[in-house]
Image (cartoon, rainbow, N blue to C red):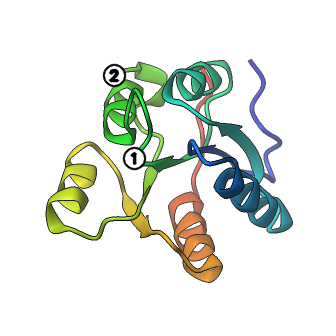
Amino acid sequence: MQPAPEQQHLVLVVDDDPLVTEFVRFRLEMEGFAVEVAHNAEDALTAALRRPPHLFLLDVAMPEINGLTLLRRLRAEKRLKAVPAIKITASAEGANVKAAMEAGAVGYVLKPFSVSDLLARVRAATKNQSRVWL
């Protein structure tokens, strides 16, 4: 298994909306991040196990398996347990934010989000992060 090049942090973006994933991919790649995209939880889990990312960006409201359940499944995998996750959500309700944090998210971004806010959170989550590849 090969990691992303050392100078690039790999971000796995998971959202069922292709417009969101392509916009986020474009902006992150412009900033020098490597990006992989998944549009559902099963594809995200497969991608993460194949090539563990440095960061997950996970939509909360997805069909079939929501982002909180996906995060719990990712956390159950030994190799993915320490990968930080930022939740992307349309709801600022305290209960939703609390549930995301309890599931292991290190932060959240509200839709519609500003690019500068998203990039700041991604940079903060990946700053000085080292990866041990198994």
- Mark 2 secondary-structure assignment: loop
Could you tell me which residue is drawn at 61 percent across and 30 percent down?
52
The C terminus: image quadrant: top right
62 vs 101, left or right, is: right
- The one nearer the camera, 7 or 21, is 21
C-alpha gap between disc 1 and disc 2: 20 Å
At which x and y percent is residue 92? 28, 70
Could you tell me which residue is drawn at 63 percent across and 72 percent down?
119
Determine whether label 1 and label 2 are within 8 Å by CB. Answer: no
Is 130 rendered above or below residue 45?
Answer: below
Is 116 rendered above or below residue 32?
Answer: below
At which x and y percent is residue 99? 20, 50
Is 32 rendered above or below residue 121?
Answer: above
Q: Residues within 10 Å of mark 2 (few under 14, many from 20)?
A: few
Q: For marks 1 and 2, give the one nearer the viewer.
A: 1
Mark 1 or mark 2: whose residue is earlier in sequence: 1
- The one nearer the camera, 126 or 65, is 65
Could you tell me which residue is drawn at 57 percent across and 71 percent down?
118
Q: Report the amino acid beneath label 2.
A: Ala
Using the rendered view, name the quadrant where residue 32 is placed: bottom right
The N terminus: image quadrant: top right
Of the numbered discs in the image, which one, if any, rests on residue 48? none
Q: Report the amino acid beneath label 1.
A: Ala
At which x and y percent is residue 114? 58, 80
Of the numbered discs in the image, which one, if any, rests on residue 61? 1
Is 17 rendered above or below residue 38?
Answer: below
- Mark 1 secondary-structure assignment: loop
Q: Which residue is mark 2?
A: 76
